Amino acid sequence: MVKCKDCGWLSVQDQKHIWHSADSRFRVKGVSSGDFIDTPLCSEDLLESCGNGSSKATILATIGKDRECSGFIPVVNGRELKGYKEMQAVEVLRIETRQNRAEDKAELLKYRMEDKAEREEQRAASEARYRKERNRTYVAIVLAAVLTFLASYSMYKIESTAKDQASPATASPEPASSAVSP
């Protein structure tokens, strides 16, 4: 809950109908110092009960009442309405910047998650290619070993068959009984 008397938007008009930030005397006593029309105004138009010619008591009761106000900005002594407008613009810019940062962080997190998912997919695909290539290599090694074994076995068989066939064709020593003749 806030009070209008503590708000920087509380304003009074001068005789030329130019709005100025209400001075501290007006905020406390309900009467402004200088050449002002003592009819307060705020940014949220919450002071409708303070019309022209309102009594000090009515003005003080109205600006001293607790209320909900979304436009409340704490009063800073010596600051005119222009200063409050600048302060509000800076606050709006700060909020927008904070929102933009939050949006940027959310977008960056989204991209990081997408990148992570993409990297995971690439890693899984790479692992699948590696396993497939490794299996092909194992099959090639086993096949080469089997073919080498078969080739070696075939060579052994050919050599042993050739030895077996060459042995009966060579002259063998004659039996001793036929070698001696009387």
Image (tube, rainbow, N blue to C red):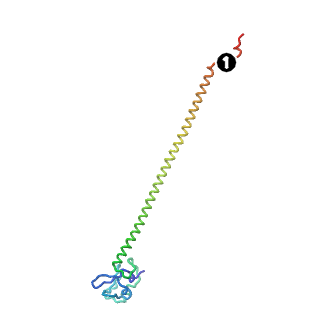
Estimate the x, y position of residue 97 in percent, counting from the top left: 39, 68
Vertical side of 18 occupied by 156: above or below: above
- Screen quadrant of the C terminus: top right
Q: Label 1: state its secondary structure.
A: loop
Where is residue 172 drawn, in percent x and y? 65, 19
Position of the N terminus by quadrant: bottom left
What residue is at 40 percent from the left and 84 percent from the top? 65
**Mark 1 Cα-neighbour bin, 10 Å: few <14, some 14–19, many ≥20:** few
The vertical placement of 11 against 162, above or below, is: below
Q: Nearer the viewer, residue 51 or 75?
A: 75
In the image, 18: left or right of 175?
left
Q: Is residue 141 above or below residue 123?
A: above
Give left or right: position of 124 versus 85: right
The percent coordinates of residue 140 (x first, y second) are: 53, 40
The residue shown at (61%, 25%) is: 163
Q: Amino acid at mark 1?
A: Pro
What residue is shown with label 1? 173
Q: How many marks?
A: 1
